Image (cartoon, rainbow, N blue to C red):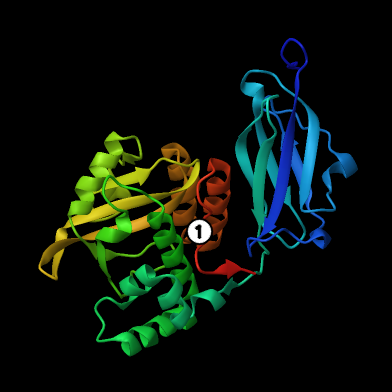
Amino acid sequence: MATPATGFKTCTLNVNLFSGARSPLAAEANPLLTIRDGNQQNVALPNNGYVKASSLSLSGLPFFDNVGDRYAVVASADGYQQAGFYPVMVNPASPAVADIMLIGKFANFNFRNALWKKLTQNHPDYAALLSAGTSGNDAAAARYDDLREDNPEALACFFNLVTAMSQIQLPVQTPMHYIKELIWDETMARDRFFAWADPALIDQVIQATGHGQFSPEAATAIFHPGATRSWKQIQFGEANVQLTFHENEKKTIDGVDCVKVEPDIDYYKDEAAHALLEVATNQLTHSLTDPRQVYVLRWIAGRHAGVPNFEPPYTIE
């Protein structure tokens, strides 16, 4: 068995549990924590891992000063989907923090903060994109309400994507600045949408790739039929935005010869994991990436990275 580094230094890990409403998890959920160090040894926890509060501070954890310090934190509870984060890097100098979100297995999307009037007031850029191509506010509101009522998973996906893209700073503006109009057809799904974008976005993504923000995807057309080029954000371990371009499909909007763009979010950063665990599973089960899982993964990843909170205008409750 691996032993801690010379001096037997220890470290502290603070775990905070949240609900899909982005508020502390109720104590009556009776969550179970499993914590494993980088040597694949389970950490002995009080009450066999069951916690009675939404926050727990664990001190005296071994510090190895090597790969053993890459801890994994997993939380589960009856009636909730399991969630976790890896790696949580620990050190003796300051407590490490793991914020984990658990959502109910039968929880629903709550769009109370995304009703059309509130959306136009609080997120005018989202509303402007949803309105593009309509004859006015009333028509946009009616089309939006139809989407919210008939296809809430597609709307949740839209909000996941636009919220995430709003937090990506390109050399000039964010990806949202370049997307001009959504394509409202059967391709608007729970895992992606298609839209028309200023082709200047491609140059911006190429520049951002040179700065280490994106990585090009090989064999793009295999995963995205008809696509010409694609880049994936590499900021987080999970739930990174991918921007895929279909440059042979074009539409002129306000004098700009736009190209089709396909934003989506994959569960995994690693291409092998993405291919084996996400794409293959989805093809075998005929399912698509779940916006609920994206919501959880992106929120956890953002908290761990210390970036502004991922807060789309809906919750899961």
The C terminus - image quarter: bottom right
Is any part of residue 194 visible from this angle?
yes
Left of 2 or right of it: where is 202? Answer: left
Q: Amino acid at mark 1?
A: Thr
Give the quarter of the image for residue 194: bottom left
Give the quarter of the image for residue 121: bottom left
Give the quarter of the image for residue 95: top right
Identified at 32% across, 86% down, the residue is: 137
Vertical comparison of 5 with 41: above or below: above
Vertical comparison of 178 with 61: above or below: below
Residue lying furthest right: 47
Residue 206: x %, y % from top left: 24, 42
Callout 1: helix, strand or loop?
helix
The foreground one among 122 and 215 is 122
Residue lying furthest front: 121
Identified at 50% across, 51% down, the residue is: 308
Residue 49: x %, y % from top left: 83, 43
Identified at 49% across, 52% down, the residue is: 281
Identified at 28% across, 47% down, the residue is: 230
Residue 146: x %, y % from top left: 42, 84
Q: Residues within 10 Å of mark 1 (few under 14, many from 20)?
A: few
The N terminus - image quarter: top right
Vertical comparison of 42 with 169: above or below: above
Residue 316: x %, y % from top left: 60, 67
The foreground one among 63 and 250 is 63
The residue carrying mark 1 is 285
Is any part of residue 186 visible from this angle?
no
The foreground one among 141 and 38 is 141
The foreground one among 189 and 195 is 195
